[in-house]
Every structure is written in C-alpha cells, then in structure tokens.
Amino acid sequence: MSAFASAQAPRDVVMVRPHRFAPNPETIADNLFQPRTPVTPTAALAEAAYREVTAMVDTLTGAGIRVHLFEDEEAGRPDSVFPNNWFTTHPDGRVALYPMYSPNRRTERRRDVIDALRSTFRITGVHDYSVLEDEELYLEGTGSMVLDHDHRVAYVARSFRSHDRAVAMVCQDLGYRPVVFTTVDGRGAPIYHTNVMMAVGPKVALVALDSIPDAGERHAVAASLATTGHTVVELASGQLDEFAGNTIELTGADGPVLVLSSRALASLTEQQVEVITAHTRLLPIDVPTIELAGGSVRCMIAGIHLAPRQAPPGAPRQAARPVPQPA
C-alpha cells in the first residue's frame, strides 16, 4: 500500500464499462441533472460511452490507481456505469447492498462483482438492504450518502432515493453518525443525490452549503466538517450543474488526486482551485456522454475500502482476458 493511502482516499476502485449505455428514462423525473429532453439511445451513443470509460480507466491506471473493471453487456441496464449506487465497502471488511429507487436499476446488483472482490480482498460480511425496496424505502449507496470513513460520518440529502428510515438503519448497522438535511437546487427542487452537491476527502470538502435552506441543518453540516478538520470549499448552485460537487479523492502512485470531470474543473474559480490543490492534485477527465445520464466521474467509481488478501510470495498475477467490444 502506498505511504499516502487513506481510508477516505482509496487506492483501489470498481468501475463498470457499459456496452449499451443510454440515459435512463425512469430517472429523468427527479434527476434534474439529466437533459430535460430525453436522449434517444443509439449505437453511436453507446460506443461513445464505452470509449469514455476506457479512457477514464487508462487515466486512473496511469496515475497509479488500481481499477477493477467489469463489463456490462446486458440490455435494460442503462445506468450500470454508476456502480457506486448499489454497493459500498468498508474498512472493517463489510459490504453493503442497497435498495434502488428505479426498478430497471435493481439488476445492477451483481454477485460476480462481490465474488471477485472476495477473491482479492478480505470481506467479513455482506449486509443486503435490497429487501427495503418492498417497503419503498430507498438508499442508493454513495450517491445517497457521502461517507467520511475516517470519522464515521454519513452526510445525506433527503430525496426519493434517500429515505430517513433506511439511513437510520444502515448507519446504525455500519456504525456511522448520520447528518441528514434537506436541499433545494437552483430550480427549487430537491437534489436527487448527495454526491452531486458534496464531496468529502481526507482534508478538504466541496459542498454547496447554500443549497441547504434550513439554517440549523446548514450549520450542522458546516459544524460537522469543522469538527473533523476539513477545509471547506463552498460551491455555487451553477457549479453543481457542471458536476463540480461530483468528485472523489483517490490515492495514486504519487499521492492524493481529486478526480473530477473536465466540465467540473472548468466551472471552478481560481481561488477554489488554489484551496483544493493545497491538499490534493487535480485529475480532470472528459466524460460528456456519461454526463448525459445525470452523473459524472464520482458516480462512475465505487471505492474499495477493504484490506487486501495477501498473495503467496511469487504468486503469478492472473492475466487479463480479452475485452469484448460494445454490441
């Protein structure tokens, strides 16, 4: 493990490369980050998304981040490129599976992904909360919760996809202190996922405090971040529309990197960049096709916070199998 590694900035991540990507028609009603005019699925769109994921994997790998890449060749899973919504991993070895709001997203939960992680990392238990879908209680992983693993805090913006009862259950089971609040975006609607308005790294946090209208809740978020020693970079609502809040800090070969889209970086002010780069290097990535689905680079990454299994000395690495091209 790198000397820079932090529980809050993992070195290993899971990504899914879709072969049939398309913006999800079932999520457009509350995901106002999707274009208001539905995007027609085409082979060219799927191919562009495939190329963007491939290029992102290459960029992350080049920075020294280990990407565990899984293919998705199935039809009917338009949002499979966003694996962070259906599972999380935790430093104590536990894995959690989450209840998903949209029915066509529920098949994204894949046993083969968990089994592959189990072969490489120490998993001590799996909590499956998907049964909560029967009660219409949803909580979409680290879309719904921005987790501070170092200080055991879960920041959650209420929405159709983040139900208070589900939050309380998961936080009690996994040992996180919930900080729950209501948000309003620039259009007067609730923000559908917390991770588009907030990101928490080991030392710096990006957050749109002005999107929290209740003064008490806004203070609670700011006070929690101050207590945990985070430098706060406040984001404006217009920057959220450019996915400036949808970032994730990872550990590369040369230290921490904040992964964000090129679109997000372009929206940041010089002063914001100066504050961020005092703590971490910026790693911008172009994902304009993926962003048509209402999420950006943070949504594309599921951090692996598990301890690795120790391979026997001299054990050969498994060769990568050829990757099929998109249909």
Image: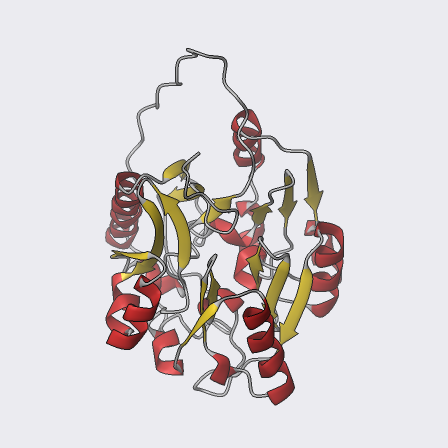
Residue 35's image quarter? bottom left
Residue at the spot x=53%, y=66% of the render? 229
Report x, y in % for residue 284: 26, 57
Report x, y in % for residue 31: 47, 71
Q: Is residue 285 above or below residue 122?
A: below
Side of 234 relative to 179 (left or right):
left
Report x, y in % for residue 168: 74, 63
Position of the N terminus by quadrant: top left
Position of the C terminus by quadrant: top left
Q: Is residue 123 above or below residue 91?
A: above
The colour scheme used to paint the residues is secondary structure
Report x, y in % for residue 132: 73, 56
Question: Is residue 327 visible to the viewer in this orientation of the structure?
Answer: no
Residue at the spot x=33%, y=63% of the render? 278
Residue 298's image quarter? bottom left
Residue at the spot x=65%, y=41% of the render? 92
Residue 127's image quarter? top right
In this figure, what is the number of numbered marks?
Answer: 0
Q: In this view, does 258 lie above or below 193?
A: above
Question: Is residue 4 visible to the viewer in this orientation of the structure?
Answer: yes
Side of 133 relative to 208 (left or right):
right
Which one is in front, 227 or 95?
A: 227
